[in-house]
Amino acid sequence: MKRKINEKILLYKIKTKKDPEAFGQLYDLYIEKIYRFIYFKVNSKEESEDLTSAVFLKVWSYLIEHKEKEVDSFSGLVYKIARNIVIDFYRSKAVHKEYPIDILEEIGEDDHNLYKIEMNQEVEKIMKDIKKLKYEYQEVITLKYVDDLEVSKIAEILDRSQTNIRVIMHRAIKKLKSFQENNK
């Protein structure tokens, strides 16, 4: 509750005084979450950084240009903009036919690096399974388990009811389990 009130105060300062320090505080609260949200969708450090910057530029512009509009939830606004930027990113990629180039790195053979490789392989398997899901399932899984958002926030971001989000989440998890059972 205190965090929500603090966000409202910061939003008020941004809208009335164009306060960059207030925006900086909101930025600090959400930068890692939004970066993780985007990275999970695009799988590229550089592109994720660029898109995350674009999100916050768009949020700033929105807040300054739409002073009269009430922002009920800053997190809802940021995630909606991030979601739209990722969609636009993939649309532009489809038009330009860009293909990623894999860069190989030399890795030493100590225990720590082997553990990291095993963990990366496990995460890669899960990522592949998640990417097999329908887009709406991917979004709900990402928002819930990667970004650790509550069902109410997910419903707000995706413009759906909480019941609908719970049903989608249940179906997505069921589908993921079936993928993993088939991989064994």
Image (cartoon, grey):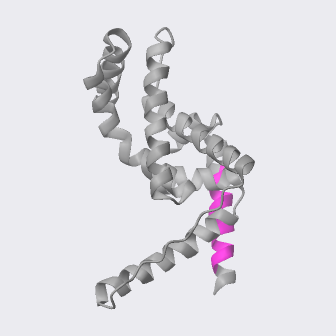
Q: Is residue 180 above or below residue 83?
A: below
Q: Nearer the viewer, residue 84 or 170?
A: 84
Give the number of marks. Answer: 0
Percent across and percent down for residue 73 are: 45, 28
Quarter placement of the C terminus = bottom right
Question: 22 left or right of 32?
Answer: left
Residue 152 lies in magenta, yes or no?
A: no
Q: Is residue 160 above or below residue 179?
A: above
| Residue with the most extreme left position | 21
Percent across and percent down for residue 163 are: 64, 42
Residue 23 visible to an observer of this rendering: yes
Q: Is residue 120 above or below residue 127?
A: below
Residue 1 visible to an observer of this rendering: no
Q: Nearer the viewer, residue 161 or 179?
A: 179
Q: Quadrant of residue 170?
A: bottom right
Residue 173 lies in magenta, yes or no?
A: yes
Question: 95 left or right of 137?
Answer: right
Q: Residue drawn 30% across and 19% down? A: 9
Question: 55 left or right of 133?
Answer: left
Q: Residue drawn 48% across and 51% down? A: 48
Percent across and percent down for residue 87 are: 64, 43
Q: Quadrant of residue 117?
A: bottom left
Q: Quadrant of residue 45?
A: bottom left
Percent across and percent down for residue 40 are: 52, 57
Q: Residue drawn 55% across and 35% down? A: 80
Q: Residue drawn 44% across and 45% down? A: 34
Q: Which residues are magenta?
A: 167-180
Q: Is residue 27 above or below residue 126?
A: above
Question: 171 left or right of 41?
Answer: right
